[in-house]
Image: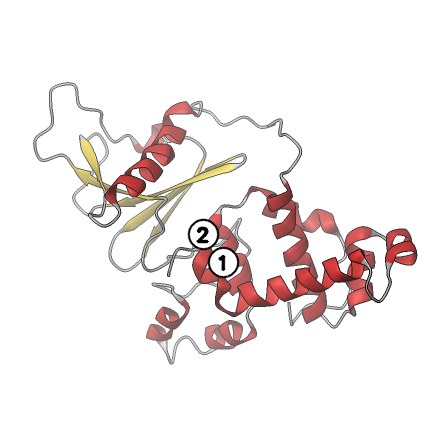
Amino acid sequence: MADRSADSWLPTAAYLYALHLDGPALAWEYLRRHPDYRRDWLRRRRRPQAAHRWGLRLWEDPSLDARDAHPAWFPDHDTVLQLYPDADPPPNASAFEFWRIPGQKYLVHDGKRLILMARWPGDCVRLALASGLEDGMAYVYAVRASAASARYRTLGAEWDKLAEVAEVSPTVAVRFRPAPATLLELHTLQALDAIQAGASLREVGEGLFGADAVASGWHADGGLRSRVRRLVRRGRSLMHGGYRHLAQLE
């Protein structure tokens, strides 16, 4: 990012959290790196509504990465479950029980309603709570009429996460080797930070893949050089608007 020193992007371990981010969280990682967003953030008190320009309901601090930030996207991502009181609950209706929701919980008011985010190792669920919903009430969750069947499957999958996770999140989680698509995001973020810190393409390659790999495979039309160039191009594209697709804003 623009305000980092030239070598702060080098430790790949600092980016490992990116392996566990979903679409909305990755969208934030790219948006918060945008120099214009960072400038707008500094002027936010003079332009409180300008957050809408970036697809946000409210301003979010770009110094916070996705582990600590809670961006309120507008409109909501399909993975946000909208919960309402059940106006006519059956006798065996399930009750909304805040403290039985697994993981570490965060509550944010986005100007209209409370957003509850629950995180546990490798996963995250976002719930939009209607104003009349209270702990212990029977509830329903809503699906927009547009693309209802696809959205219903998405919401059902998100709700299943809550049913399958143990009451107490494990302190240690065993994970399989990251998928190539997941590693791509890690490398893209690291490459983007490096370029914005003033590193050359070759320095980016050495930081991501090692000096030995660059010494043996860095040629004018070599695969490694092209790979680094594509990572940088992809990072800039996602930062300059491509993040909207990750957050389902378009």
According to the image, label 2 marks what residue? 24
| Residue at 55% across, 70% down | 34
Tell me if I can see residue 66 in this picture. yes
Name, please, the residue furthest toward the bottom. 46
Residue appearing at x 49%, y 57% in the figure: 27
Q: Name the spot of residue 29 as percent of width and height, x first.
A: 54, 58
Say if 168 sits above or below 63 in the image: above
Asked if marks 1 and 2 touch (Cβ < 8 Å), the reply is: yes
Front one among 194 and 107 = 194
Provide residue 144's location: percent of width, then percent of height: 22, 47
Q: Residue at x 29, y 49 (%)?
A: 114
| Residue 8 shows in this picture | no
- Residue farthest toward the left in the current orientation of the protein: 88
Above-or-below relation of 177 to 220: above
Residue 125 sits in quarter? top left
The residue that disc 1 covers is 28
